[in-house]
Image: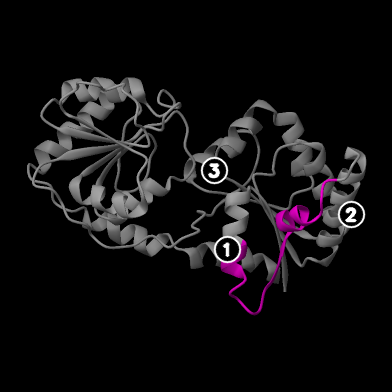
Amino acid sequence: MKLLIYGTTSHSNRLAEILMQDNNIEVIDLAKQFCKHAKARFPIFFYIERIKKMVLAIYKADLIYTIFMGNFSKFNFIFFLVAKIFKKTTINHWIGTDVLIAKKNMHKCAIMQKLIKYNYCGSEILYDELKEIGIKSEIVPIVLQDIPHYISKMPDNHRILVYLPQGREVFYGLNIVKKLIYKFKDIEFYIVANDSDIFSGVRNVKILGNVSLSEMNNIYDRISILLRIPEHDGLSLMLLEALAKGKYVIYKYEFPYTFKAQSYEEAEKAINIILKKEKKPIANQEASKYIAENYSTRLYINKILEKMHE
């Protein structure tokens, strides 16, 4: 069986690596094929060479799986048109920002939908947003690395972890986070992915900057709550990790074993409920079990490969 993969580099490269371990699947990694030929002296020849490689790859494939390619562009249109001409089964996976783009370009997106056979999306949030613009999809979480399912240590006192990437603080809920920090002065807030001085001199804030995987594991041992309230989200790996480790999660959207909060008032209420319920942090065992049973690399890959047999 030959599977063609193309789309966002970080996703497609990792998926190709995983699938190449299966002797029954031949992976056609189109992104790598594009990288192999040198850029031509004249742009038109470079583009023609890419189209030739694309057409040949599509012709050889038994199944085509793309990520972040559901929106209209000249290349995307030609890609799916060629697949349609060759009567290939196609899957496009929506992951987040592409859904926001689609909502602003519904008519062009509708053209693409005539060429794409199946749509997957990473979460219920994206499923609902795609449904609003007339795109029927199936929820298939992208899990490119198995999430360690073990209950991490719980601290003696509640601490809150916040992902607040530098340069995108407002998008990730800075205004709400600030109010909560000043409201709950007896709770420490750990800020990751940011080493700016926005909380300089604030006693109950620890700025941890960019941290490694091993450092993140240590941080999880010291916190009891994850606060994640971005303007928009797909399927957050941090959300899954925190739940798998038995942490409480306050999240912008509906998600099993989390507290939904879309405003400062709702986030404040959620923190107060947790503090009242568990004065000393206790692991969220049911949440960890739920992630273990529903989110894995094998489940994700099986949902792709099942379309080969249709």
Residue 129 is drawn in which quadrant? top right
Q: Name the residue under label 3.
A: 127
Binning the other alpha carbons within 10 Å of mark 3 as few (below 14), some (14 to 19) or many (20 upward) gives many
Quadrant where the image shows the C terminus: bottom right
Q: Distance between the residues labelled 2 and 3?
A: 34 Å
For marks 1 and 2 on the same chain, the one whose residue lies earlier in the sequence: 2
Q: Which residue is drawn at 18% across and 47% down?
A: 222
The reply to whether residue 120 is visible in this rendering is no
Which residue is more in the foreground, 230 or 16?
A: 16
Vertical relation: 50 (above or below) 183: below
Magenta-colored span? 16-39
For marks 1 and 3 on the same chain, the one whose residue lies earlier in the sequence: 3
Hey, what amino acid is under mark 3? Tyr
Q: Mark 1 points at which residue?
A: 303
Question: Which of labels 2 and 3 is toward the front?
Answer: 2
Hey, what amino acid is under mark 2? Lys
The reply to whether residue 167 is visible in this rendering is yes
Q: Distance between the residues labelled 1 and 3?
A: 16 Å
